[in-house]
Amino acid sequence: MNLAEIFKVLGDETRLRIIHLLGWQECCVGEIEIILGISQSNASRHLNRLKQVQVITFNKEAQWVYYRLNQQFIAENKLLYQYLKGKFKDLPECKRDLQRVKKYKSSGLTCQDLREKTKQKNRGL
Amino acid sequence: MNLAEIFKVLGDETRLRIIHLLGWQECCVGEIEIILGISQSNASRHLNRLKQVQVITFNKEAQWVYYRLNQQFIAENKLLYQYLKGKFKDLPECKRDLQRVKKYKSSGLTCQDLREKTKQKNRGL
DNA sequence: TGACTATATTCAATTATGCTCATATAATAT
DNA sequence: ATATTATATGAGCATAATTGAATATAGTCA
């Protein structure tokens, strides 16, 4: 049942945090790693899972893969997404992540700046 | 994260079918078994999982345990429930179950009638 | 070309989930 | 009390999900 599949994919804290994050800005994998503080392979895996059920989509630019919420999914699941947004607002995990998004944004860093050495510096975002 | 927990619990076809069923009528465990065509222990376990996250609640009457949707949960998760109801309408599994609910209702059987021998007769609902 | 970087994938280990069968518990009925 | 019924729970198994570490792939840049 496809509906169960969707919920199964939503039933993971990291994936919910990714959805929340992508609600604020489109991100490449490296940004997701840094902002959420998760490993590269983990990020990639969760993104893949979200992609499978079409919650997110992506486009490649050079060596970067930019992920974003799939507007078609949102359109087809409006109530669910409204529900999520409402809940995200009050979740400590999401509030914390939002702070990090803001910090990252104001840092002026972009995907292109996230070389290994730069990453080190920003581990403590 | 509690939100992830909720989705995890919703991420199972049988549990979604139970929620759908309880949207039509409060049921004892035996009725759920018969209408959904699942085993007793399976029914009990899934009900327990749904109870844990407060999606459903129950009351005991004599030897029967009647389960129903938890109105408080619904109130606190209106958008989610609206979303579910909208999706349920179009799911083949739910349509089939609804037929069975109607058949069961029109049979005039109640929880008290579901003795073993009666169950046999109704396996083919 | 070769070195580097971003992302995806594989492997192995661990843990969680769902199912069945059998048994436990508790209420009812005789 | 004993037998019966409704529901819950435990044990065991098969399968799926999660994770880290290592490796593969593919694009970029010098």
Image (cartoon, coloured by chain):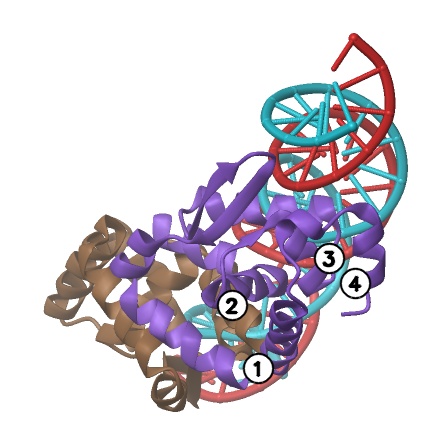
Chain colours: A purple, B brown, C red, D cyan
Residue position for label 1: A91
| Camera sees residue A28 | yes
On the image, the x and y values in percent for residue A31 come to 65, 56
Q: Amino acid at mark 1?
A: Leu
In the rendered image, which residue does mark 4 sit on? A122
What label sits on residue B68 in the rendered view? Answer: none
Counting residues from the N terminus, which is met first, the one under dot 3 or under dot 1? 3
Q: Nearer the viewer, residue B36 or A100?
A: A100
Distance Cα–Cα, label 3 vs label 2: 15 Å
Q: Are marks 2 and 4 on the same chain?
A: yes
The answer to whether marks 2 and 1 sit on the same chain is yes
Secondary-structure class at tag 1:
loop
Q: Nearer the viewer, residue A112 or B3?
A: A112
Residue under label 2, please give it: A20
**Can you tell which quarter of the image residue B34 is in?**
bottom left
Q: Nearer the viewer, mark 1 or mark 4?
A: 4
Quadrant of image for the N terminus of chain B: bottom right
Residue at 29 percent across and 79 percent down: it is B26
